Image (cartoon, helix red, strand yellow):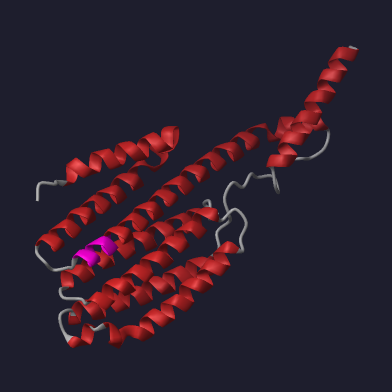
Amino acid sequence: METAKQTIYRNVMRYLLALVLALSASACTVRLIADYDAATDKAVTALQREVETFFVKLANTAGTTAADYSRHRDFYERIKVDIAAIEVRVAAKPRNELTLEQIKLLRDSLSKLEEIHKEGIRDSKLVEHLRGQFNTAFVAILKLELTKQRGE
Amino acid sequence: MNLNLQEILNPMLSAAQKELGNKWPDVKDYADAEFKKLGESLLSIAAMRAENKITERQAELLFDIQRNTARTVMLTVEGLGILAVEGAINAALGAVKGSVNTALGWTLL
């Protein structure tokens, strides 16, 4: 036969368990970070492809007038729109602060790329360096996004 | 130029390891590879400037981009750590699912 003390203890434990688990569990699993978003994955991958294409063209023409900033204004206009659209999408998702911060950093880096370009591209080594930096950033963003799939 | 890769890589890895504490083993492989790339990049900026392939202003901007990239990598490392913790919590909840539901008398988990 259960004593009053045991009953109280059991009820308190039930309440605590229910409270803790209800607060932390959503659909039976805890989510500390946003879910994977296929649209973000696709948009970041598309932007990476566009930036990569730009670097390939620039590396082939470095040191010539074909590499002048004035010839590539369209590229910068396009990617500003692309990155703004990605930022809005990422910001709309809950618990997505890490990815949002990454996209803001990428936007800043693209703006600095434009400044570098305005100063002139004298050597393909500079382009290769920039290409490596942006690829590292894109890989990092995509790695986090893909890991959000959590093996599903 | 007197800098070498190991000279700048070790302090970067030590700082990251200190920040991440016990989450470090989960992300070590990725962090090791990425910080090596970042260290090489820093040396590359210094070399290009020394060879006058870039202006001083471009070197500053390249360094800013490098800093943004390093921060982006760190955010991924942080995210992977959080996902590892999340996985551990869910595994723990999964392990007690049956007994918790039985104790409560209804299906919570």
Instruction: Name the magenta segment's main secondary structure.
Output: helix
| Image coordinates for residue A39, horizontal then vertical, percent | 54, 69
Stretch in magenta:
B56-62
| Image coordinates for residue A57, horizontal then vertical, percent | 25, 81
Residue A61 relative to residue A30: left or right: left
Residue A68 relative to residue B98: left or right: left
Which quarter of the figure is the N terminus of chain A placed in? top right
Q: Is residue A97 above or below residue A50?
A: above
Q: Residue at x 31, y 78 (%)?
A: A53
Q: Is residue B57 magenta?
A: yes
Q: Is residue A66 above or below residue B83?
A: below
Q: Residue at x 82, y 22 (%)?
A: A10
Q: Residue at x 15, y 62 (%)?
A: B49
Residue lying at the far front in this picture: please name it. Answer: B57
Q: Residue at x 18, y 68 (%)?
A: B55
Q: In this view of the protein, which residue sits in the foreground, A20 or A84?
A: A84
Q: Is residue A54 above or below residue B17?
A: below
Residue A113 in view, yes or no: yes
| Image coordinates for residue B77, horizontal then vertical, percent | 42, 47
| Image coordinates for residue A81, horizontal then vertical, percent | 48, 78
